[in-house]
Image: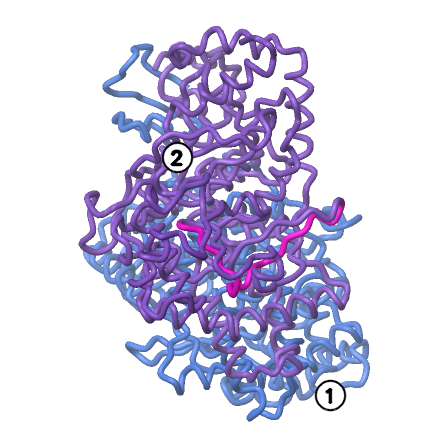
Chain colours: A purple, B blue
Amino acid sequence: MTAHPTPSPSEVIASGADLLADAVAAQAVPVTRVDWRPPMPGTEADLATVAGDPRRRDANARAVEAVLGVTAHLVDVVPAADALDLQRGQFLHAGPPIAWERASGPMRGALMGGAALEGLVGDPEDAAALFEAGSGVSLEPCHHRGAVGPMAGVVTPSMWVFVLEDPATGRRTHCTLNEGLGKVLRYGAYSPEVLTRLRWMGEVLGPLLQAAVRSVRDAGGVLDITGILTQMLQMGDEAHNRNRAGTLMLLRDLAPAMVTSAGPAGLDPSDVAEAMRFVGGNDHFFLNLAMPACKLALDAARGIDGSTMVVAMARNGTDFGIQVAGTGDEWFTGPAQLADGLYLGSYGPDDANPDIGDSAITETAGIGGFAMATAPAIVRFVGGSVPDALATTRRMHEITLGENPRWTVPVLEFQGVPTGIDVTRVCRTGILPQINTGMAGKQAGVGQVGAGLVTPPAEIFPKALARLAELAGGR
Amino acid sequence: MTAHPTPSPSEVIASGADLLADAVAAQAVPVTRVDWRPPMPGTEADLATVAGDPRRRDANARAVEAVLGVTAHLVDVVPAADALDLQRGQFLHAGPPIAWERASGPMRGALMGGAALEGLVGDPEDAAALFEAGSGVSLEPCHHRGAVGPMAGVVTPSMWVFVLEDPATGRRTHCTLNEGLGKVLRYGAYSPEVLTRLRWMGEVLGPLLQAAVRSVRDAGGVLDITGILTQMLQMGDEAHNRNRAGTLMLLRDLAPAMVTSAGPAGLDPSDVAEAMRFVGGNDHFFLNLAMPACKLALDAARGIDGSTMVVAMARNGTDFGIQVAGTGDEWFTGPAQLADGLYLGSYGPDDANPDIGDSAITETAGIGGFAMATAPAIVRFVGGSVPDALATTRRMHEITLGENPRWTVPVLEFQGVPTGIDVTRVCRTGILPQINTGMAGKQAGVGQVGAGLVTPPAEIFPKALARLAELAGGR
């Protein structure tokens, strides 16, 4: 830390920890940051090639503009069979493609529970043989069907999904309904209580939410998920591991319609009350709306040639993969990392599975770990300190292409969240995207063991850069 | 701003703006603050006397402990006639005692509307003569009947009130149901729409909330208002002018019981839906629970001889009054000030009435303006800057006796809110309590014109100090 000793400095030069520089900057003193990190090893030539790509600047500007132009409305709730044309025996999962052989414990546990839910087996334990044989079952990433799934992200035909739509284009994305925390399918648990809850969600919660959403829509109302996200960021949520305010706003927006549409949908007041208790009792319920809203925004930038912007970060519990606007649907993958964080009960680091889930789509869109400054209370859930949380959001601005004028951070004087991870900036600075995440038990059937902080494996960014350089004609 | 120019200072001496000192402190560097202000003029002798009162230290410790020991549960919703033994023609109002002759425009407007609501007159405009004559009508502060009222704070017998109870002692406080913003009675408006809304609140909302609260209570549930306040402070609410998360949590906690108890209470699903829309559509609804929760806590410190802690700050639109733990029920009053803030529509400073309402009970309890650091988004409603909001909470620690371990501010690394305004510290430093508040139009009938920041008139603290010195035997 270095500062002029004058009472009213006209200029301050600061390096190292950001906090002094930030404080000085907040007092309107010009600050020159001399923070410098070397580029990732071996990326110099590709960085030069991509930097020289004449399409890059305009392509990235268009990519950011496309993402920021999207609004996500909740327009329906339907079974995945209908929304995603998912057939019996077809399973969607989180992250890049993976086969049963390489699948982690929680991914296997969720698939086994899903097989039992669909009646492919009577006992989830019997499903392992089914997946080993590969007879009548198939696995496919959620991202390949316009969906995202938290943690294991397993979607089966009978699960109900939220349908989000961008009104300007009609494009849609989807996500299942959130089950809560602890022993739940997406964390790899498949005990009878897990399946009983999923059946209730299919028989009562899904149909009731469908009736309510359709009732709002038919009355000319709008369920503006992007707008709720805007408000959440003013209310201490970062929309990945804190979705408290978001969940409450969703309940506020749906509750009156749940009351008036239950009867016509054949449901009782006791069903409505139970559904309200379920939604209101699960602070993470809104995560399954935040995620598809982020995917809907990011999908707008897919396929923009020359753009170096990341459009998806996703983990299947074994591999961490990214997709980039300028490289089509190709995945760049490396080993999923272990999160560093806080554990539930008596669980510890030895119990945790590597990073898993499509939920890093939130960070890809500028929230989650990228917006931790607006949710300092989250350090009690994922670990770290409040100054770390503030510093993380500032650091993410160094690897992103823009700021989101709708999604702002009050404590940073309403600065927009850092938006659009730039592969070249990541490679040039060595700064990795910061993700905060839940941690699944590594044994199938365990469920959640904690929550923490994690990054992608560094090597996937040079891989993506190399492909961008090749497409730019430099390899 | 002065700082050692060394790269790793072992000590920093800072004066003036807090931000640099705070940033350095956050980096774990020892900081010596040399900020010093002279005491308020003429208070030196009384300060010496009160400082020498042997009861003071223990009395203040007991006062803080008493306040922090209170938990507020919502236990009922009933008409004020029943809860407060309020008779026809009796009107409660905000602030210290005042007669019609000295009442401000918004206070008069609210009383006129209240008279029409009670059927004392057909047209609110006819009520002025009634109050001038004083025939069959009487005015009394809410605080004198175990109640608090926001803005004009007018309570009439037919209005329904929340009943809050401290389970450890059975003590109770009360507050009306919040009407929303804009043209509402508490801001002095009394048009037909205002009275129509109040009648619906009496006929539908009050009875429905009563049924729901009793249903929760009868099932062994607890509606923990203190607990909701704890959560709100983690969600960007300061519980005076931001009650968004609090309102949503109340709705979450009551919604299921509203659904199941409506039928037995003779209400339709459409009534339930309308009530949910009303509560969910009014971000300030929870204010009327935050206020009596704060009064319930502070009332625990009333009458502690020797304590210099403020137990109430309240304004009637003409006078600002405080009550102090060690001086019984005496009010120390001075002229209410004009707030500095943001105006609605085309309104400006000339349209605003001086400070009004019992809502400063929130600041008295350590939230509201005292907790602005946790609610930086509020500067878009009440004015000021984000650094100001952070600095305000830090400054209030200089005039308070303790911190609240339950009500913490995440961005200040979970420091407890500054609790227990100390008359001696206010006089010694000249730092006045910071209140953020709504602004009523000064003409009866107008309603809200804005929101802003305000302080008490400085002279009331030396007045209270003089009385404390007298009681300590020094005068």
* Residue B413 in sight in this render: no
Pointer 2 residue:
B38
Residue B174 position in % (x across, y down): 48, 76
* Residue A111 in sight in this render: yes
Q: Residue at x 55, y 18 (%)?
A: A468
Q: Write down the chain letter for disc 2.
A: B
Q: Is residue A379 left or right of residue A90?
A: left
Label 1: few (<14), some (14–19) or many (≥20) C-alpha neighbours in 10 Å: few
B288 to A443, vertically: above or below: below
B174 to B426, vertically: above or below: below
Of labels 1 and 2, the one closer to you = 1
Label 2: few (<14), some (14–19) or many (≥20) C-alpha neighbours in 10 Å: few
Q: Nearer the viewer, residue B397 or A452?
A: A452
Residue A144 position in % (x across, y down): 55, 43
Residue A69, picture quadrant: top right
Q: Which residues are magenta?
A: A152-168
Say the numbered circle drawn on residue B119. Answer: 1
